Image: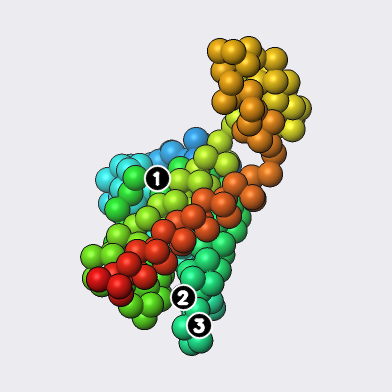
């Protein structure tokens, strides 16, 4: 009977209080270890050793949790390491976006978490300040500066989302991506040149495995466009 009373007393003891920061940190750990599909309110509660209903004091649902994660994911990003004082804004922005992509690739499912979310958290704002500063110092007006931030960051996030998604159902089940691309190249090469003359002409390049080159090509064209716009404004 004494043992039962002791057990009841133990069960009545309140669990240690947790903070919103602790919830966010636990969500980040779960995301990195198990992926976004495995992240649920119940799984997060288990990670924190609390009952699932207790989580709703901190976040109302998974979408609200993802809003927190979208900013927390960026905590260790250091774009300010690429700030330049020599006026070479193109290299400055290019290095920042290369850093941004590499960073997001190191964070599991970051592209999926960030996709479509309007980010106004402190970490994103810190990085936005750095990027906007580089664009403004280059001489762009306020509208071009704002649009440049959106275009550059969304390009990186969208590309990361694309490159971290399975190429096909077979690849999602474990097939070798390189073998899939080789099969795709063979299929494209076997198309009718009369029906698909342009696809056949560049087919081998369409299915090339060099994702790094694809990323830098798109980034460089974005930066070329910004430079051209700046030059045209100065000539007006």
**Which residue is at 56% across, 36% downward?**
165
Q: Position of residue 235 (x, y in %)?
A: 30, 73
Q: Is residue 11 visible?
A: no
Between tags 1 and 3, which lies in front?
Answer: 3
Q: Which mark is residue 83?
A: none
Q: Position of residue 55 (x, y in %)?
A: 35, 48
Residue placed most toward the observer, 208 or 178? 208
Gap in angstroms between the C-alphas marked 1 and 3: 29 Å
| Above or below for 73 versus 194 | below
Residue placed most toward the observer, 12 or 192? 192
Image quadrant for the C terminus? bottom left
| Above or below for 129 versus 182 | below
Q: Which mark is residue 89?
A: 2
> Do tag 2 and tag 3 residues touch (Cβ < 8 Å)?
yes
> Do tag 2 and tag 1 residues touch (Cβ < 8 Å)?
no
Task: Find numbered disc 3 in the image and state the secondary structure of the residue it sits on.
Answer: loop
Q: Which mark is residue 115?
A: 1
Q: Which mark is residue 84?
A: 3
> Do tag 1 and tag 3 residues touch (Cβ < 8 Å)?
no
């Amino acid at each position: 009977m004494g043992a039962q009373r002791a057990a009841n007393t133990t069960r009545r003891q309140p669990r240690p209080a947790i903070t919103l920061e602790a919830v966010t940190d636990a969500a980040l750990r779960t995301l990195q270890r198990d992926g976004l599909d495995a992240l649920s309110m119940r799984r997060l509660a288990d990670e924190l050793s609390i009952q699932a209903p207790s989580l709703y004091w901190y976040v109302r649902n998974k979408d609200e949790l993802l809003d927190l994660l979208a900013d927390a994911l960026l905590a260790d990003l250091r774009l300010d390491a690429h700030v330049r004082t020599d006026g070479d804004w193109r290299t400055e922005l290019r290095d920042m976006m290369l850093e941004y992509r590499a960073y997001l690739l190191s964070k599991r499912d970051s592209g999926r978490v960030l996709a479509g979310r309007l980010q106004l958290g402190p970490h994103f704002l810190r990085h936005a300040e750095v990027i906007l500063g580089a664009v403004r110092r280059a001489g762009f007006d306020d509208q071009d500066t704002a649009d440049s931030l959106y275009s550059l960051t969304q390009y990186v996030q969208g590309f990361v989302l694309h490159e971290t998604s399975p190429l096909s159902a077979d690849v999602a089940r474990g097939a070798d991506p390189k073998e899939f691309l080789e099969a795709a190249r063979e299929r494209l090469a076997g198309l009718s040149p009369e029906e698909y003359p342009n696809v056949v002409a560049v087919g081998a390049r369409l299915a090339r495995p060099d994702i790094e080159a694809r990323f830098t090509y798109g980034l460089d064209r974005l930066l070329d466009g910004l430079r051209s716009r700046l030059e045209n404004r100065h000539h007006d």
